[in-house]
Amino acid sequence: MSPSKRREESVAVTGIGISCALGHGVEQVWRAVCEGASGIDRTKRLDVSTLSCKYSGEVDSLPAVVRRTGTHPDRATRLALAAVEEAFDSAHLASADYDPYRMGVAVGTSVGGLDQGERFHWDVLAGGPGAGRRGLLTSYPLYTSADAISVAFQLRGPKVVISNACAAGSNSIGYAVDAIREGRADVMIAGGVDVLDILSLAGFDSLNALDPEPCAPYSRSTGLNLGEGAAFLVLEAESVARARRAPVLSYVLGYALTSDAYHATAPDPAGSGASRAMRRGLAQASLTPDRVDYVNGHGTGTPTNDKAETKAVADLFADSPSTPMSSTKSQVGHMLGAAGAMEAAACVLALRDGMLPPTINVGESSGTPRDIVPNRARPQALDVVVSNSFAFGGNNCSLVLGRHPVPPAAAPDHRVVITGAGPVTAIGSGRRELVDALRARTSAIGPARLADLSLSRTRRAAEIDSADCRRHVDPAYARRLDQIGLLTLAASRIALRDAGLRITRANSERVGMIFGTFSGPMHTVAQLSETIGTHGPHRVNPRLFPNSVMNAAAGHACLALQIRGPLSTLATGGASGLTGLAYAADLVRRGEAEVMLAVSADELTPLLHCGFDRLGLLSDDTIRPYDATSDGTVLGAGSTALVVESLDHALRRGAPILAEIKGHAVTSDAYRVAGNDPSGRAWAESFRRALDDAGLTAGEIGTVYGDARGTAAIDLAEVRAVAEVWEPGRVRLSNLSPYVGHVHSTTALMSAVCATETVRSGWSPETPAPADPRGTVTDYLGPVPETGASCLITAANWGGTYASLVLAPCHDTGPSTAAKEAA
């Protein structure tokens, strides 16, 4: 991306919205926080009679929602819409005043509409596949609330859902800051939402992590209480906020992500990952620890978390031991994916009013190693605060907020290349194996042999044999992994081997991972859900529960490979893999890491297959993309990892350079929850913006790797989008789905692997000619492009999110001037 598009300025917070156990509305919640009130009480909505903990931070009544989305919102979506509406109003924001493609949304969530999916599953268990209510499935995905926000407020810019467990809310704010600073958005709505769910309660109970009483972080530290709610911030470029004379509440000065690579659930007791996240976040704003006035801690109340975090904070602030730290989870509970957003909102209000929020439930005789602001809020002048979020799988995120703008530290603008690929597909694993199978036009679509798909009307699939994955994974470690964990680690190992990259103690902190998934750990979630539905929540297996969070597979991979750099998990449905590749490229471009693994993985499970079948999306035969006679898609499974690194780093180590990442974009059609605009206008806009980001014209693209999957609305939208940007016969449209199946978020990364061959040789997979072509598609299924032409890869999600990324040949053969100077 051209550095001229970057904004070297702070990002302003101009609006806040909150709904939680302390009430609805910012001022009501903040007043309760400052008064030391508790929203934690006995759980009423869910039956927790067989669990050890009867307490939670429950929202008593749902807030009213004024803006409509065309569907009846589930609990999570309703909470999110109400909070965003308040944030919009408090920022005096009017969507009509902006280019809608420069207004986006970033949502952190861990649970989303899981309760809807559980009801569908229990209906199927009780009455067979026909009993599963279709309407539940459109509210189940984690991306539903993001789509609803996009529709309600007509936000057509970058859209992302982040699901790295308890760090998701903070990470979503950091992602939004990046989008603004990189010049891809003017305004971002960022925050998190989660609701109390019986699986989460049962799972934490099985780990003996819940406190049977209202929790007491940093003092008694005998467990946590779960909470629910939503918190969202309006973020704007400082110049944009000033130009419209917006009420600026504070500024986001920096954020950082790290990985512990220590344990699947427990934090590193030395607190090293947490400490690195805080230090890096401060460094982004050219600040030192002595400038920090307050830390809003993760503070769950579990002994392992409280001890590790307290050590990390003590080490970082060794020269200023009086820096106070408190945990608002003692008042609202642990809101999982919304926790970091709720705590960021509390930090903004603390800066606004010069008031330290308390840690309540601290006993009079409690001896604590730090000032944890016990029981009562107190006034204090605040200029800089740090907000910490640490999650399962060793995911750490620290936000730095300030009362005054601070220009960000100068960031590099590295060129970014792909040096290794690890596809695990139904037609072969490995870069060369995939390309050779596609050259031979091999298709894996056929009757299912490995999975029991008897719940579905059709039994067609493109399956992966887990034995193929196990060849690439240490047998002792493989026993810890579920299906998606196995896919993720196998692809990562193949990619690293292909790149000739070895992760060592010396470089582990400069290597990170972005993981994208549509399905997540569906197999594990289904096992837990079935146990709850048939035997009760108290029978949940504690060995299974840690693998049920979306980021578990990435956490396992980082642990096995000892990756300690930036770590995040994206769950924006079918756009997750490609958006993750773009996020990884941005982190490398700005110097947050030297190397990133961009990984996507998706399972094929009986319940997932049944759900798609109930929605009428599955074919009885095969996938015929762009064909009006097609009757649906065929689901596949697989994973792909790409090694992404700076060009200078790749040249220094003599790595094979497969292609250069030139630019990318994400748009939304803001059309309908669970629906796609058949006009393809927003999809075409993602093409244009990715090309602009890459500094290329449409005429410089030889091949577009599409994401059509044999379903009417998406296939037609893609054809119309391509026709809007390219003249007939000027680009080739290639599609992998007839060969590997529709592998949700992963097909796009498989396409990226093929694109590295396309930019080298000009070859691309042949798309079968449709019997009854949609639109003008036959004009784009023509001859092979010239060798050396660039490629555009695109991905679409149900609900109208579109990601596009440009790959080009890399012609450099020697190190850059900067690399020579460094050497």
Image (cartoon, rainbow, N blue to C red):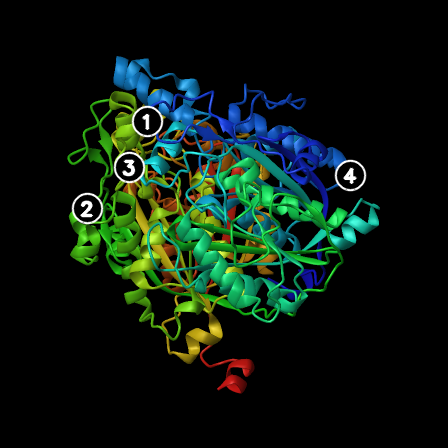
Q: Nearer the viewer, residue 343 or 802?
A: 343
Mark 3: secondary structure: helix
Can you say whether 715 is above or below 569 in the image?
Answer: above
Q: Amino acid at mark 1?
A: Leu
Q: CA distance from mark 4 to mark 3?
A: 45 Å
Q: Are marks 3 and 1 in contact (CB under 8 Å)?
A: no
For the residue marked with disc 2, what is the amino acid? Ser
Q: Earlier in the sequence, mark 2 or mark 3?
A: 2
* Alpha carbon distance from label 2 to label 1: 23 Å
Q: Is residue 361 visible?
A: yes
Q: Nearer the viewer, mark 1 or mark 4?
A: 4
**For the residues marked 3 and 1, what is the alpha-carbon distance in whole angstroms?**
23 Å
Q: In this image, 103 relative to 118: left or right?
A: right
Please say if the residues under marks 2 and 3 sit with CB atoms less than 8 Å apart.
no
Which residue is under mark 1?
A: 618
Q: Residue at x 53, y 44 (%)?
A: 363
For marks 4 and 3 on the same chain, the one whose residue lies earlier in the sequence: 4
For label 4, the residue is 97
Q: Which mark is residue 466?
A: 2
